[in-house]
Image (cartoon, rainbow, N blue to C red):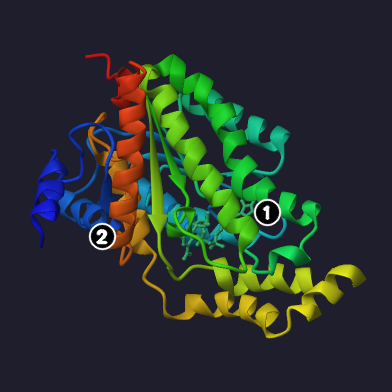
Amino acid sequence: MSAHDVTRRSVLGGALGLGVAAGLGAVPITQAAASERAAGRPHPDRKVVLITGSSSGFGYLTALTLARAGHWVFASMRNTRTSNAAARRELLTVAGKEDLDLEVIDLDVRREQSVNQAVSRVLRRARRIDVLYNNAGTFSPAVLETLTIDDIKESFETNLFGHLRLNRAVLPAMREQREGLVVQMTTALGRFVLPFMGPYVGAKWALEAMTESSRYELSRFGVEFVIVEPGAYRTNFLEPNGQRYYDEYLRSLSRDNARRRSEYGELAERAEAHLALGRDSLDSHEIADAIASVVRAPRGERPLRLVGPGMEPFLDELNELTEGVARGAMTGRGWDDLLELDTGS
Ligand SMILES: NC(=O)c1ccc[n+]([C@@H]2O[C@H](COP(=O)([O-])OP(=O)(O)OC[C@H]3O[C@@H](n4cnc5c(N)ncnc54)[C@H](OP(=O)(O)O)[C@@H]3O)[C@@H](O)[C@H]2O)c1
């Protein structure tokens, strides 16, 4: 371990071994998950939590993990009466058996009316929203030139605008409460680029930027933003969901796009390799535990980013560099008051 690493790790001190002294910084996902497992349950301070995309994967597991930690969880998913009726039943059955405070509500992040109705419903029931976990996402690999602008908008509609829609719906309540936490799922690919997934990485890069922007803009209102940047985990993301979106893409290729695709030859086939990556991935409970640890962490001590695992050496350096530049530029403008959360104390 280098002296630089030692300094970093000591800066990441804080009550749960998670917080960062100056309000920014990054923490390894593995460390955050371990601190939650060691913390003991239930959580002393019950939060009202809204999660998007709870029908499978990280959303599903995090809903149960947070409810088991004693929080009041609104696990949202789209199509609760049709394609996700079984997922809804399954989640409610577990919640019923374990006597958890977990409700399933309908929410399609692509539809403004659905988002607004769901948020109003939570506010009517619980009178507040302490935590929003923006989780819903879709993936489909492709050579960028074979996608129309409408195809790219489709991906952005869920992977970028869906999250911004939720923020717009929830933030007025959080500002009024002068307290709130938005956990923003991006990906390690929100910080570097691989080919054959242009719309996905493009949306996630934009989400990284807008989330960091919101973190500064909302700090005075006591509202925190934390970005989660995982590597590959076993969920429904690639199989079956990604495979289904990819099959739809192949089926609906126009003649022009099919010609372009064939002109890329074997490169077009490489896109499909992304879909095979999920098979050897990590256990997704780690992400649910890491998010629970962020919820548990004291206000003002939550890191800007959770990274890894396996990505820390690269992402730590990159994140430190960009956060350092932002910190310097903001300090130069006299805006360093926005770098730390105003906790009102
Ligand atoms: N798994 C990984 O390796 C990995 C790595 C880095 C980041 N991530 C990110 O983690 C997040 C969750 O993905 P996951 O891995 O848990 O995959 P997943 O099992 O496929 O879960 C994705 C969830 O998003 C939901 N969703 C999609 N479109 C939606 C919409 N319009 N409205 C509401 N919900 C919608 C899906 O619901 P339906 O069932 O209705 O489609 C599903 O519940 C995504 O943002 C993804 O980018 C995943």
Q: Is residue 342 left or right of residue 242?
A: left
User: Do the numbered discs 1 and 2 sit on residues whose CB atoms are within 8 Å?
Assistant: no
Q: Residue at x 60, y 57 (%)?
A: 200
Category of crowding for the residue at label 1, using alpha-carbon neighbours closer than 10 angstroms: few (below 14), some (14–19), many (at least 20): many
Q: In this picture, is 226 found above or below 220? A: below
The kind of residue on which mark 2 rests is: Thr
**Residue 285 lies in quadrant:** bottom left
Q: Would residue 223 be seen by someone viewing this image from the given angle? A: yes
Mark 1 or 2: in front is 1
| Residue 304 pos. (x, y %) | 33, 40
Closer to the camera, 48 or 309? 309
The image position of residue 120, as x and y in percent, is 60, 26
Residue toward you, 78 or 98: 78
Question: Which residue carries the number 1 mark?
Answer: 155
Quadrant holding ligand 1? bottom right
Question: Which residue does the image show at 26% across and 40% down from the upper left?
Answer: 296
Side (left or right) of 290 relative to 250:
left
The amino acid on which the numbered mark 1 sits, given as a three-letter code, is Ser
- In the image as oriented, which residue stretches furthest toward the right? 255
Residue 302 versus residue 35 in the image, above or below: above
Who comes first in sequence, dot 1 or dot 2? 2
Dividing the picture into quarters, in which one does residue 82 lie? bottom right
Q: Name the spot of residue 335 as percent of width and height, x first.
A: 35, 18
Q: Give the residue at mark 2.
A: 30
Q: Which residue shows up at 51% across the image and 61% down it? A: 193
- Residue 89's place in the image compared with 253, above or below, is above
Horizontal arrangement in the rendering, residue 85 relative to residue 297 (left or right): right
